[in-house]
Amino acid sequence: MEDVLDVYTRPQEEGKVLICMDETSKQQIQEVRAPTPPAPGVPYRYDAEYQRNGVSNLFMFVAPLEGWRRVEVTAQRTKSDWAKAVRQLVDEDWPDAEKIVLVMDNLNTHNPSSLYETFPPAEAKRRACPVHS
């Protein structure tokens, strides 16, 4: 844990960006009954019954020292989904960064093999090289 905290306290360097990444699944629900309107001193009342409309995955990328964030919503959380999110991070969000320090958990999809399974080798290597965890 101390190693991760040390990463956050490193001084900012030219051409280097610190990105924190995490993901979560969220259930999509729809109200079945309209809420009861508020009355003086009484807030809206919502029925506990709902209709389930599937699940979405959210990838969250945050550059805390830069004041930047991006949320990407996907239908699932596969190696390919993660690789495509990293592609956008490297190619579109931070194309001028010499090095991206990517702080993330150790989920099985979070490794260079996901890039190589999704993209041709030259593209995978180019995207993996500026990213260091």
Image (cartoon, rainbow, N blue to C red):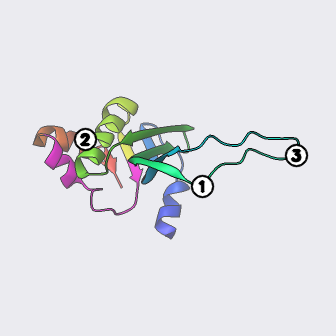
Precedes in sequence: disc 3 or disc 2: 3
Residue 48's label in the rendered image is 1
Identify the residue shown where x is 49% and y is 57%: 7
Residue at mark 3? 41
Which range is magenta?
101-119
Instruction: Name the residue at the bottom extreme.
Output: 1
> Distance from label 1 to label 3 (Cα)?
21 Å
Circles 1, 3 touching at the beta carbon (< 8 Å): no
Q: Is residue 105 magenta?
A: yes
Say few, some or many: other residues with alpha carbon within 10 Å of mark 3 (under 14 / 14 to 19 / 20 or more). Answer: few
Three-letter residue code for mark 3? Gly
Q: Nearer the viewer, mark 1 or mark 2?
A: 1
Identify the residue shown where x is 53% and y is 62%: 5
Circles 3, 2 touching at the beta carbon (< 8 Å): no
Say few, some or many: other residues with alpha carbon within 10 Å of mark 2 (under 14 / 14 to 19 / 20 or more). Answer: many
Where is residue 4? Give x, y as percent.
48, 63
Three-letter residue code for mark 1? Ala
- Closest to the observer: 128 or 53? 53
Residue at mark 2? 127
Circles 1, 2 touching at the beta carbon (< 8 Å): no
Identify the residue shown where x is 32% and y is 42%: 86
